[in-house]
Image (cartoon, rainbow, N blue to C red):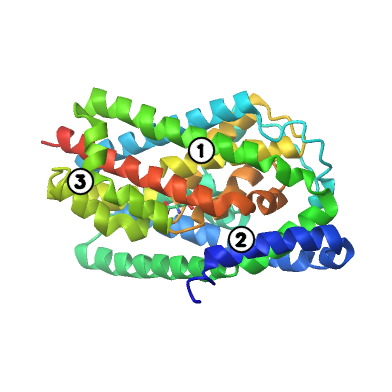
C-alpha cells in the first residue's frame, strides 16, 4: 500500500485528477491559483541559499589552494566543458525540433508575458556583482555563484581551525537546505494538482499535447550526449573504451535512474569506479563527490530544452543574446542544483527568469518531469564517472 502511494504515483494521480478537474470544473479550480503559487514560491525560496552554500562548500571541500591548482582546475575545466557541450546539444536539438512552436495556445492567462532583450554588456553584469547582498535579494544566481567561488577559494587561505568552523557551519546549512528541498518536493502532488488544473482551465488541453514533443527532444538530447559526445571525449582524452567502461560501472547510472538522485548514488559510484572501473581512490574521492554536486550534464541539457520549449509555448521569440543567456544560466543552474530528485525543476525558475519567460510554464512541464528526472540523473552520474576516469589519467 505504501509503495502504491509513493510520491511518484501520487504525483501521477494528481496530474490525471488535475486534468479532469481543469476540463470539468474550470471555474472551481481557478480558485486554486493561490495554492499553485505557494508551491512555486516554496521552491523559489530555496534557490538562493542553496546555490550559495552548495558552491561555497564544494570550493572549501578542496581543502587547499594547491589542490585547486592541480586536480581542482582540471576537474572543473572538464566539468565545465562537458556541461557546456551538453547544453549545446540541447540548444541545437530544441532549435531544430522546435517543440511547442505554434502550439497556438493562449497562455497569457497563466502569467504576464514579459520579453526583454539582452546585450553582451548585460551578460557581463549578470555575472559580476557590485554588491553581493543585492545579488542575494534580487536572486541573481550567476552573480551568487561567481561570488561563492571566489570567496570559497579565498576562505581556503584562512587559519586551519577557523576554516574547520566555517566548513562545519556551511555544510550544516547546506544539509538543512537539502532537507528543506525534500520537504517541499513532498508537496509535489498538491502543487501539481493546482498548477495542472489551473493551466488546463485557463489555457486548454492543447498545451499538454505538445509535451510529448518536448519530452522526446530531451530524451534524444540525453541519448546523444551519453552515447556519442561523452564516449567521444573518453576515446580521445581518456584513451579507454567507454562502452566497456559503462558495462563495468553500469550499476551507478542504473541506481541514479531509479532514485533520480546523484547524491543517493554517490556511494555506489565511488565503489564501482574504484573497484570495477580501476580509478584510483584519491581521484575518485575528489572528482566524484564534487561531480555529484556540480557536474550535471543531463540536468543542464534539460534546462536549456525546457526553457526554449516554454518560451515557444508563450510565443516568445528568443534573440541570440537570450540564447547565450540560456546557455550560461542552464550551465550554472545545473552547477547549483542539488543532487536530489526534482532539483533541476527548482533551478529552471532561474533560467526562465533570466530571459523573462513566465515561471508559470513550469506548471506544464512538471507533468513529465519525474521520468525525465530519472533519465537526466543517470546521464549526470555517467558524466561524473567519465570525469573520474579521464582526470585519473591526467593527475599522475
Ligand atoms: N535529480 C538530479 C540529480 O540528482 C538533479 C535534477 O533534478 O536535475 O542529479
Q: Residue at (20%, 63%) from the top-left corner?
A: 160
Name the secondary structure under disc 3. helix
| First reached walking from the N terminus: tag 1 or tag 2 | 2
Left-right relation of 48 to 146: right
CB under 8 Å between discs 3 and 2 = no
Residue 62 appears in view:
no
Q: Which residue is mark 3?
A: 67
Q: Residue at x 34, y 55 (%)?
A: 255
- Whole-angstrom CA distance, mark 3 to mark 1, is 36 Å
The answer to whether the residue bearing label 2 lies less than 8 angstroms from the nearest atom of ligand 1 is: no
Q: Is residue 286 visible?
A: yes
Q: Quadrant of residue 22?
A: bottom right
How many numbered discs, if any?
Answer: 3
Q: Give the spatial CA distance, label 1 vs label 2.
A: 19 Å
Q: For residue 74, which quarter of the picture? A: top left
Question: How far apart are labels 3 and 2 at the CA level?
Answer: 46 Å
Tell whether 217 sits left or right of 340. right
How crowded is the residue under tag 1: few (<14 C-alpha within 10 Å), some, or many (20+)?
many
Circle 2 residue: 12
Q: Tell which residue pokes out farthest to the left in this image.
A: 396
Residue on which disc 1 sits: 219
Left or right side of 10 for 166: left
Side of 98 where 396 appears, left or right: left
Q: Please tell me which of labels 3 and 1 falls first in the chain.
A: 3
Residue 215 x, y percent position in the rendering: 58, 41
Q: Nearer the viewer, mark 3 or mark 1?
A: 1
Measured as percent of width and height from the top left, residue 208 is found at 72, 46
Helix, strand or loop at label 2? It is helix
Amino acid at each position: 500500500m505504501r509503495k502504491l502511494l509513493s510520491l511518484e504515483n501520487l504525483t501521477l494521480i494528481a496530474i490525471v485528477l488535475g486534468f479532469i478537474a481543469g476540463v470539468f470544473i474550470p471555474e472551481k479550480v481557478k480558485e486554486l491559483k493561490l495554492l499553485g503559487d505557494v508551491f512555486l514560491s516554496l521552491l523559489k525560496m530555496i534557490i538562493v541559499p542553496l546555490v550559495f552554500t552548495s558552491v561555497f562548500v564544494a570550493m572549501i571541500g578542496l581543502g587547499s589552494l594547491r589542490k585547486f591548482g592541480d586536480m581542482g582546475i582540471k576537474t572543473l575545466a572538464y566539468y565545465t566543458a562537458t556541461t557546456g557541450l551538453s547544453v549545446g546539444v540541447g540548444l541545437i536539438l530544441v532549435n531544430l525540433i522546435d517543440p511547442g512552436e505554434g502550439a497556438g495556445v493562449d497562455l497569457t492567462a497563466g502569467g504576464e508575458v514579459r520579453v526583454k532583450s539582452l546585450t553582451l554588456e548585460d551578460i557581463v553584469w549578470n555575472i559580476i556583482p557590485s554588491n553581493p547582498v543585492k545579488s542575494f535579494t534580487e536572486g541573481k544566481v550567476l552573480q551568487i555563484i561567481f561570488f561563492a567561488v571566489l570567496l570559497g577559494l579565498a576562505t581556503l587561505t584562512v587559519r586551519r581551525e577557523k576554516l574547520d568552523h566555517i566548513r562545519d557551519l556551511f555544510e550544516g546549512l547546506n544539509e538543512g537546505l537539502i532537507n528543506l528541498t525534500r520537504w517541499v518536493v513532498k508537496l509535489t502532488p498538491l502543487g501539481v494538482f493546482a498548477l495542472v488544473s489551473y493551466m488546463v482551465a485557463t489555457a486548454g488541453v492543447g498545451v499538454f499535447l505538445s509535451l510529448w514533443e518536448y519530452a522526446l527532444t530531451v530524451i534524444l538530447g540525453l541519448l546523444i550526449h551519453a552515447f556519442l559526445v561523452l564516449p567521444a571525449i573518453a576515446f580521445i582524452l581518456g584513451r579507454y573504451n567507454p562502452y566497456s567502461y559503462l558495462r563495468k560501472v553500469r550499476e551507478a547510472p542504473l541506481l541514479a535512474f531509479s532514485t533520480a538522485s546523484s547524491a543517493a548514488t554517490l556511494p555506489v559510484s565511488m565503489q564501482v569506479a574504484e573497484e570495477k572501473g580501476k580509478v584510483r581512490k584519491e581521484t575518485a574521492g575528489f572528482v566524484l563527490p564534487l561531480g555529484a554536486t556540480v557536474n550535471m550534464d543531463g540536468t543542464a541539457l534539460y534546462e536549456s530544452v525546457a526553457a526554449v520549449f516554454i518560451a515557444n509555448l508563450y510565443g516568445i521569440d528568443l534573440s541570440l543574446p537570450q540564447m547565450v543567456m540560456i546557455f550560461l544560466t542552464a550551465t550554472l543552474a545545473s552547477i547549483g542544483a542539488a543532487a536530489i530528485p526534482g532539483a533541476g525543476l527548482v533551478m529552471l525558475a532561474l533560467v526562465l527568469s533570466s530571459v523573462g519567460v513566465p515561471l508559470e510554464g513550469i506548471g506544464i512541464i512538471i507533468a513529465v518531469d519525474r521520468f525525465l528526472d530519472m533519465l537526466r540523473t543517470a546521464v549526470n552520474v555517467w558524466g561524473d564517472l567519465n570525469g573520474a576516469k579521464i582526470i585519473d589519467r591526467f593527475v599522475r
